Amino acid sequence: MLRVAVLASGRGSNLRALVDAIGRGELAACIVGVFSDKAASGALALARAAGIAAIHVDPKTFPSRLDFDRALFEHVDASGADLIVCAGFMRILSPEVVAPRVARMINIHPSLLPNYPGLHTHQRALDAGDRDHGASVHVVIPALDAGPVIAQTRIAIAPGDTAESLAARLLPREHALLVQVVRWCSEGRLRFDAERVVFDERHLTGPLSAD
Ligand code: GAR
């Protein structure tokens, strides 16, 4: 059974999607811990309610970003996770902790990468006049939101859309995308490193579609 660690800072709806898929028997994985920089995050509350180890590591108690990151990943490593999923984890991670884990760490990002790394992705897609928007699951590498894209989900931007309406329409698609990618990992169909993604023994030349 694939052992999954989830890093999350906020509400935790992507974590919820994973927990629910496991509960319904649709995902053969086990969440071995939820790790957060925010004591009040919904993700930690959800983990506790689901009987999953919930660990808060407070950035304010460390002298540097790297010290925090090292402490965080000591906990993650102790969980014995095979796969580390960043699901709304809103801190930039130091290269020193990312580099050794590139082949087993993924992130969900609310844009069609390589468009709009960073923040405010919905508004930036609107401001650019894009017709499409979406979300990506990508390999985490030291550069922000820049690792190989594993899979995407795509929605059309409609007249009158706002950042809020786009976010609301995209969220359930994000959930399905993340569950699908974790399922592919659990089935042994997916492997990756900082340069490439291999799916069913073929190198991907572009992202898979989860739609
Ligand atoms: C999701 O929309 C995710 O794509 C985004 O944060 C949200 C977390 O929601 N991630 C990023 O912006 C990462 N840069 P959740 O806490 O309900 O899963």
Image (cartoon, rainbow, N blue to C red):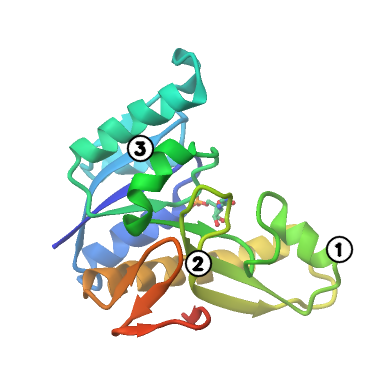
Q: In the drawing, does residue 45 fall left or right of residue 158?
A: left
Give me the disc on residue 148.
Answer: 2
CB contact under 8 Å: marks 2 and 1: no
Residue 108 position, x and y percent, is 50, 59
Residue of label 1:
127
Q: Depth-wise, is mark 2 or mark 1 nearer the camera?
A: 2
Residue drawn 26% across and 32% down? 75
**Does any portion of residue 54 appear in the rendered image?**
no
Residue drawn 25% across and 73% down? 26
Kind of element beneath mark 3:
strand
Residue of label 3:
35
Cα–Cα gap, marks 2 and 3: 24 Å
**Three-letter amino acid code at the position of disc 3:** Phe
Report the residue that reaches farthest toward the left. Answer: 1
Residue drawn 77% across and 66% down? 125
Quick one: label 2 or label 3, which is nearer the N terminus?
A: 3
Cα–Cα gap, marks 1 and 3: 34 Å
Label 2: how many residues lie within 10 Å, few (<14), some (14-19) or many (20+)? many
Could you tell me which quadrant the N terminus lies in?
bottom left
Kind of element beneath mark 2:
loop
